[in-house]
Image: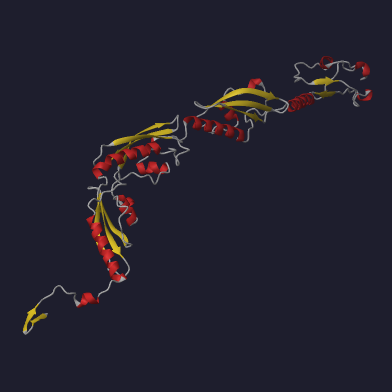
């Protein structure tokens, strides 16, 4: 600008420059919510970039991975000990996480936004996580402890089987599935099966599992899996099955003694002899031992009742009682004897008495069988234990010159 100086009649113009003067743009500008929000966004970005130490507080013992990605900015700020960081009411959005376990760092993008302002982004790296070299030994030890802590260690798929080489596990995954441990966390370690020891008496399978991971010393875990069948249970089951099969066996009818009374003289000497007589030679004894016990004969019913003991090493003996039918009975034998004697008499046709000078009468009735046999001159007659009763018979009449009598047994 020009400044005119005067003093009386003396005048002089002086050019003076005043700076800086506000521009028209600045004179026209006023503080508004929009440019205030932009200032907040820019300041928050600058403040985040100025944080010199971004080291995890809460995950020093963890490898950086997706499991410990921050859900929101507040968790991130808390983890680097910046709980009092002023976000100036901006919104911080975390994205694009990248985890580097080799160096123990986690990097991600933060987007800073606020209404009416242009968003700003920056990439942040948090260090201090465990590295793979540091984490591998801990992981191996953790997997070992977790395997040993599985509870219960009880087979699901082999409860009815003895623990044998036939059902040895082929892989650790197969083993874990059998223990209902499908979600077991192996922490990216390599698990391999080692020696397997089967104990059929105890119903257990003991397995050695090797655990390995890069940057860690290999270790092993030994676990014992229970719940398999045992030799004692299998033996007892066989004993009970044979017992039930003997009781259910039908028919139980003698094939060789149908004409004989059941007596001590024809008692069975062995179970095989009994089974042969019953035509049950193919009876499945499994691997049990059968022994005959007390035998009770009932001649009236024509039966033999036999006690059989079933045994097998490692189990409790079982006993059962079976009744063999089809033997002759005392009633049938007695009837057969009477019939035989009767037929013998019929075969004699007519016999003549020595008392030819007498008429048949009560005075000359036979007093006993010997008197009768002598009178008709009969010797060596097979009586079969039949009793002779000499009673009056309508045939015993003088005019018929005959004498009759009855037989019974």
Residue drawn at x 67%, y 31% as measured from the top left: 326
Left or right of 364 in this view: 38: left
Residue 69 screen position, x and y as percent? 32, 53
Left or right of 232 in this view: 136: left
Of the pair 206 and 262, the residue shown nearer to us: 206
Left or right of 159 in this view: 329: right
Residue 53 screen position, x and y as percent? 23, 50
Q: In this view, does 4 lie above or below 272?
A: below
Question: Which quadrant holds residue 27?
Answer: bottom left
Of the pair 53 and 270, the residue shown nearer to us: 53
Q: In this view, does 398 lie above or below 134?
A: above
Of the pair 314 and 112, the residue shown nearer to us: 112
**Taking the image as drawn, is residue 123 in sight?**
no
Of the pair 222 and 50, the residue shown nearer to us: 50
Question: Which quadrant holds residue 337?
Answer: top right
Residue drawn at x 55%, y 34% as measured from the top left: 241
Q: In this view, does 112 lie above or below 176?
A: below
Question: Which quadrant holds residue 21?
Answer: bottom left
Residue drawn at x 49%, y 32% as measured from the top left: 234
Q: In this view, does 298 lie above or below 187?
A: above
Figure coloring: secondary structure
**Taking the image as drawn, is residue 253 in sight?**
yes
Q: Which residue lies furthest to the front in this view?
A: 8
Quarter in which the N terminus is drawn: bottom left
Q: How many labels does the image show?
A: 0
Left or right of 316 in this view: 189: left
Residue drawn at x 30%, y 70% as measured from the top left: 34
Quarter in which the C terminus is drawn: top right
Residue 263 screen position, x and y as percent? 67, 22
């Amino acid at each position: 600008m020009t400044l005119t100086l005067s003093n009386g009649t003396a005048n002089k113009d002086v050019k003076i420059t005043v700076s800086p003067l506000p521009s028209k743009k600045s004179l026209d500008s006023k503080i508004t919510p929009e440019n205030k929000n932009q200032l907040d966004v820019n300041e928050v970005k600058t403040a985040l970039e100025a944080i010199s130490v971004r080291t995890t507080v809460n995950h020093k013992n963890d490898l950086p991975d997706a499991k410990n990605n921050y859900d929101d900015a507040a968790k991130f700020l808390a983890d680097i000990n910046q709980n009092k960081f002023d976000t100036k009411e901006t919104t911080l959005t975390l994205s694009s996480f990248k985890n580097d376990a080799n160096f123990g760092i986690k990097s991600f993008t933060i987007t800073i936004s606020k209404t009416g302002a242009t968003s700003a982004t920056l990439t942040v790296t948090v260090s201090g996580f465990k590295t793979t070299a540091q984490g591998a030994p801990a992981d191996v030890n953790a997997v070992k402890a977790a395997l040993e802590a599985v509870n219960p260690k009880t087979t699901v798929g082999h409860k009815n089987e003895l623990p044998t080489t036939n059902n040895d596990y082929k892989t650790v995954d197969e083993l874990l599935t059998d223990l209902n441990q499908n979600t077991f966390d192996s922490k990216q370690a390599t698990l391999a099966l080692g020696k397997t020891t089967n104990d059929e008496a105890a119903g257990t399978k003991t397995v050695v599992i090797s655990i390995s991971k890069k940057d860690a010393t290999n270790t092993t875990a030994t676990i014992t899996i229970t719940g398999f069948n045992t030799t004692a249970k299998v033996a007892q089951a066989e004993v009970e099955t044979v017992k039930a099969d003997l009781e259910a066996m039908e028919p139980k009818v003698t094939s060789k003694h149908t004409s004989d009374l059941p007596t001590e003289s024809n008692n069975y000497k062995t179970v095989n002899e009994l089974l042969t007589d019953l035509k049950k030679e193919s009876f499945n004894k499994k691997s049990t031992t059968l022994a005959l016990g007390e035998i009770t004969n009932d001649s009236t019913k024509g039966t033999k009742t036999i006690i059989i003991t079933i045994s097998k090493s490692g189990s409790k003996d079982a006993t059962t009682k079976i009744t063999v039918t089809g033997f002759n009975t005392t009633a049938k034998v007695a009837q057969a004897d009477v019939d035989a004697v009767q037929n013998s008499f019929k075969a004699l046709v007519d016999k003549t008495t020595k008392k030819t000078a007498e008429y048949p009468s009560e005075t000359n009735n036979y007093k006993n069988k010997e008197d009768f046999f002598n009178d008709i001159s009969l010797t060596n007659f097979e009586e079969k234990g039949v009793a002779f009763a000499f009673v009056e018979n309508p045939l015993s009449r003088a005019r018929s010159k005959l004498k009759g009598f009855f037989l019974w047994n």
